[in-house]
Structures are given as structure tokens and as C-alpha cells.
Image (tube, rainbow, N blue to C red):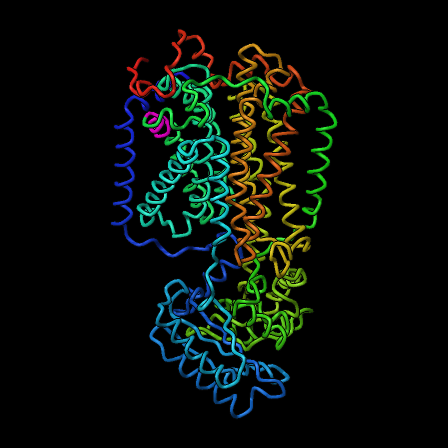
Amino acid sequence: MATFLYRLGRTAFRRRWYVALIWVAVLGAVGFGAVKAPAAPDASNSMPGIESQKAFDLMEQRFPGAKADGANARIVFVAPDGQKITAAGNKKAIDKLVDEAADGSQVAGAVSPFQANAISKDATTAYATVTYKVKADDLTDASKNHLKDAIAQAKHAGLTVEAGGDALATQPAAGGAAEGIGIAIAALVLLITFGSMTAAGLPLLTALIGVGVSMAAIMALSSAFGLSSTTGTLATMLGLACGIDYAVFIVSRYREERAKGHTPQEAAGLATGTAGSAVVFAGLTVVIALAGLSVIGIPMLTKMGLAAAGAVMIGVFIALTLVPALLGFWPNAVLSRKARKRGRIKEGGTNNGGSRWARFVLRRPLPVLLLSVVGLGALAVPVMDLQLGMPGDEAKPTSTTERRAYDDLAKGFGPGFNGPLSIVVDARAAANPKAAVTTIEKKIKATDGVVSVSPARFNPAGDTAMFTAVPSTAPTDKKTQDLVKTIRNQRPATEASTHGASFEVTGTTALNIDMAQKTQNALIPYLIVVVGLAILLLMVVFRSVLVPVKAAIGFLLSVLAALGSVVAVFQWGWLASLLGVETTGPIMSLMPIFLVGIVFGLAMDYEVFLVARMREAYVHGDNPRQAVESGFRHSARVVVAAALIMMAVFSGFIGASESMIKMIGFGLAIAVLFDAFIVRMAFVPAVLALLGKAAWWMPHWLDRILPKVDVEGEALTQQSTIPPAPPAHDDTAAREPARI
């Protein structure tokens, strides 16, 4: 492989104009396809195999025209202090709002609180429900502004009016200015690392091109493969992250080869043949992690994972072709300012921060190992109290109308009112459908934890009914989760008394509970598949049994510590105020899956780049301790820079107003911190120091079975010696004749 990639790098350097034009053509072609492609379908949150989804499907089938996912707005009214909502002036203002809200082309209906008896017991709070024919994403600005104007008029009458539901919900936004600062910090880290504007800008440029190609391709294929507009979110994040990392390692190795006296073209070939091999296998580990999301059984996650895997592969191809081509355009500009000023590049010394740190760990491997394991283990303890769920309006900042509406409803009607359970009764097989539904209503109403049950609403055929049950506790409360389980556990006895009817529990609260359970059940199989395949792949790369196992253990330590930190902050409330988290609660259901998938990919990047240099030194004659030091001398600085870049980018999401985005940004940033600076910089060298030669041991029978790939570039060292490069300021360096 190293020889093939070496030739690919030299060819790309020599034929740089062709390579650049090919990528421009690819970008133009997919961009044209994206423009001409039909609009992307609406995002589908379908969750096959769970009861809530089955009930939603039954509702849409038996109640024609009643979209279960249509937009809605719950307008909450609070009377001024000392007044009742039923006062003549207040009633007039509410009726006027409802009448105006109902007068809209996209409105399916608007129900006054005085018609639906939606008034609190103390008559200080009421709510009106406005339903729409279309999803929230399809609401026009005219429809939204019409409702906002009606709300504004009611406020002028002296009422406190807030809007819940999804019709006017503020869309989650990333970190805004904080995210921009994160990207600026990433650029600064690159500039400090390389000492060259060109070297700092090249990885950013190629990563952006890769993201552009992948996103345009996703848009072009969206209609054919049912990819929604949200499918590319993960692809953008990882395409940018991995694209920068891969380009950084190629550029860094190119500068190293130039320091050894190689000509620019030869240095580009050697960089692609050695660091490029690590890029290929690092990319494959990321692809494994992303493709493994299909194990979860959620179509949305599967599509997001495969789309992101495609983006990562495009990043790999760009690193192997476009990066050496761009090095051909600026062979000396990517060198440090000192190197260009001297006019000749001198090879760096054998002693730097990386080698000094490695020697420190090699002298004290056991204390360093124990300290890193105990520290990460302590941070992982909160995982034992992990509660999964989907935070709703209660997790939004108080500056949003949805959060204020949530609080007003909880105060006026009780905490469970914000998360009612929808009961769907299939009475087709019952002798008396109405009597069967009434029986189920009474049974559920008598269940401890249920405050009230609404009157049942039948479909036109009269064989299916829906009603709601209001819990006494909040939607994210564990008691609500227990209530759903209790109702379902009592189902056999309840259904037996109806003589043929059956029912299912759904609604947003039940759906979130089911989703949390489904993802929790899938987490272990996902880990087994992803880590197992990665261990096999790393065995091929490192020709070792213990090094891949060590990599997997290190990853598990970092991801558990990161998840424990997320629980401590967002569930327990530690340092929550410092991060602007206003309300603690359950951890987003998909957070562990996202954390495992994304962090696994980035962790294996760092593992491959760092340990591949150790393996390379060991294969070329260094003893195990020297190999560890050599790997750190050549790769530690670049791994640290790559980690700082990722932390800066991810930390930008912490500045978002949405709690879930904060959670994702914090979780990813802290996971990269743990993995890069504790696991890779301390745990890995300590374990390798204790293992010695055993670290690189592999049974002969396994060595014969596994395919052999030259990741270390051993074949390249057998080539004839290349004459030293001319001075860095000599323009002929960029015009040397091609020789392969």
C-alpha cells in the first residue's frame, strides 16, 4: 500500500493542474446535481419496532386527514394578578385571538379554552389549541406572522400570553459567535503549529472542499434515497473534523521529509506513502463506526451514519490526491518562516516536547498508568446514574416563549399536563366498541399516577378511539416512565375485560421513553460490532494483538469518562450555571450513540497516527522504548494540535442557547480532551512501556491469515537514495522532473 500511495502522491504533485481541475469538476458536477435535484423529503422520525410508533401509524390509518405530525400551537393565557381568566374583558380578548387564529389557509382548527373547558381550577390560567394541516417546517411566514399578530393583540389587552407547541418554536442554533471563535482558535492552532499561513490554510481549504463535495452529493441524492435535510448534519461535522486532521498529518509529514533533504516531489510522495497509509486506515475505522449506526435500527440514524461515512471517505481521497497537488503549487510556502528565511531546511533535533514527555512516562509507566485509569474511572462513575430521555421545552432557556408557556401550564394545571399520554384503542374485534373503550378509560383513570382522562374521540367508522391520560408528574420525571410501564404491564388484564379490544400508549412522552429504551438496548451490540471490527482492522495495521486491545480499552475509558461528565453537568447540575445550563434533566437519548460513534472515529485517528509512527520506528530497528519515544517525537505535536482544533470547534456549540446542542458540544469537546491528552498521551505510552516487545507480538498462524499491508513504508526505504533538495528559496524545487 505504501508504494502505491507513494506513487499516487508523486503523480498528484507532478500532475497538480489535472488533479485540481478534476476536483473542481467533481465539485461543479455534484453542485449542479444538487441544484437540479428535487427538494429533500421531510425529516422522518420513524422508530420501527416500538409501541409508540405503531400507535402513531394506527392513528394516521384510522383517522383520515388527522396528521399525527401536523404543526400545533398551544396558546397559554395567564390573567393579571387578582383577576380571573373568565372575566368579561379577558374572555373577549381570548375569543378574539382564537377567531383570528382560526382564519388562516393552513389552519386545521382552533379551539377556545371556554369550549374545551381548558381552564385551571383557580381560573387564572387557560389555553387554546391551534392545529395546522402541515408540518411545522412547511408553515409559511405568513401563517406564523398571522398567529404572532393575534397574540400581540391579546397581550395589549393585559393578558400574559405565551405560545407552546412547534408552530412558533425557535429553531435550535449552533454556537453563533462562540462557534466562530472556536474556528478562529482552530486556525490559530494551525498557524502556531506550522509557523506558516499557507500550511495553516491548506488543511482548512481542502476540508471545506471535501465538505462541499459531500454535502452537494447528499443534496443531489436526497430524493432518490430519501435523505432529509438533517441527514447532512453529522456529515458536515465529521467531514470537516476528519478532513482537517488528515490534511494536517500529510502536510506535517511532507515538512518532515523536506527536513531530511528530499526534493518537494519526493517529499510529497513519501508523505502520502507513509502518513497517507495511516490516513486510509484511520478513515476506515471512522467509516466502521459510522456504518455501525445501522445496528441501532433507526432509519434516520442509519442514513446519517452512511452519509457521514461517505463524507469521511471523500476526505480521505482529498488528503491523498488534492493535498499533494496543492503542495505542488506551494512547495516552499508550507514550510515554516524560519526555514524559508534560512534558504535551506535543516532536520530538527531529536529532542522536543514530545520526546521529553515520552521519556517521562517511560521512566514512570506504572504510576502514570494507574493515575490515568483511576482518574478516568472516577469521572465515569456518574454513568451508573444515567437517565435517558428527550428534553423538551422545559430544557429551553427562559428567554423563549415555549419555556414560559411550559412553566405557566405546569403551574396552572400540574407538571404532568405538559406530557399527556395518548391512548389509541383498536375496538374492531370488540362486540361493543363503545363499551370496550369506556372500560379501558376507567381502568387507566384508576391507575396511580394518572390525574385525569379526556373523553374518547372515535373515528368515522366507530371502531377506533383516542383519548389522553394526564400524569401527575413531569414528562421527564422517572415516575412518568414508571407510569407508562405500569399501564402497559396491566394491559393483558385490561384488554381481557373488553372482550376483543386492544390499546397502545403513545404521545410525545411515551415516544421519548420508547426511544430511550431502544437506544439503550442497542448500545452494547453497537459497541461490540464497532470495537470488534476496529480491533481486527488495527491488527492488520499494527501486526499486533495487544496494541488493538489496548486501543479499545483506552477508547472505552475516554468515552465513559466523557459520558460521566455529561451526566454530572446536565443531569446532576455540577457547573451547570457556568455553562449556561438553566434546567437539568435526562440525557438526550441519542447522546451515548453519537458520543460513541463520533469519538470512536476521532480516537482511532489519534491512535493510528501516533502508534503507526511507533510501529514504523520498531520495524526499522528501534527497540520498544525507543520506538515509543520516536513516535512521540514525530507525532505528539501534530496529534495535540489536531485535538485542540477539534476541541475548539466542538466547544463552539457550548455557546448555543439550546440545552441539547450545549450537551453535544460539551460531550464531544470533553471526550476529545480525555482521549487525546490522557489516553493517547499517558495511558498508551505507559501500557506500551510495560508490555515491551510483547506489545508487538502476534501468533504466527494469525500473522499468516491476516492480509499484509505496508503501512510503515518499509518498501520505500529500500529505494535508492534521493539527492538532497535545492535551497528552499530556489523555484526550481517546484519544477523538478518527475521520476517514479
Picture coordinates of residue 734, whole percent (x, y):
32, 21
Question: Quick check: 505 above or below 222?
Answer: below
Front-most of residues 614 and 232: 614
In the picture, the quarter occupied by the C terminus is top left
Q: Which portion, as a residue range, is magenta? A: 321-328
Picture coordinates of residue 138, whole percent (x, y):
37, 64
Is 384 within the magenta?
A: no
Q: Is residue 129 left or right of residue 513?
A: left
Q: Does the rendering let one see residue 458?
A: yes
Residue 106 sits in quarter: bottom left
Q: Does the rendering let one see residue 709?
A: no
Question: Quick check: 245 above or below 686?
Answer: below
Front-most of residues 462 and 4: 4
Question: Quick check: 317 above or below 522?
Answer: above
Q: Is residue 614 left or right of residue 731?
A: right
Q: Residue at x 72, y 23 (%)?
A: 364
In the picture, the quarter occupied by the N terminus is top left
Is 327 within the magenta?
A: yes
**Count of numbered marks:** 0
Front-most of residues 333 and 455: 333
Q: Residue furthest bottom?
A: 88
Q: Residue at x 43, y 43 (%)?
A: 235
Picture coordinates of residue 353, whole percent (x, y):
60, 26
Q: Residue furthest front?
A: 341
Q: Specify the principal SS of the magenta part.
A: helix
Picture coordinates of residue 193, whole percent (x, y):
50, 31
Q: Residue at x 60, y 43 (%)?
A: 670
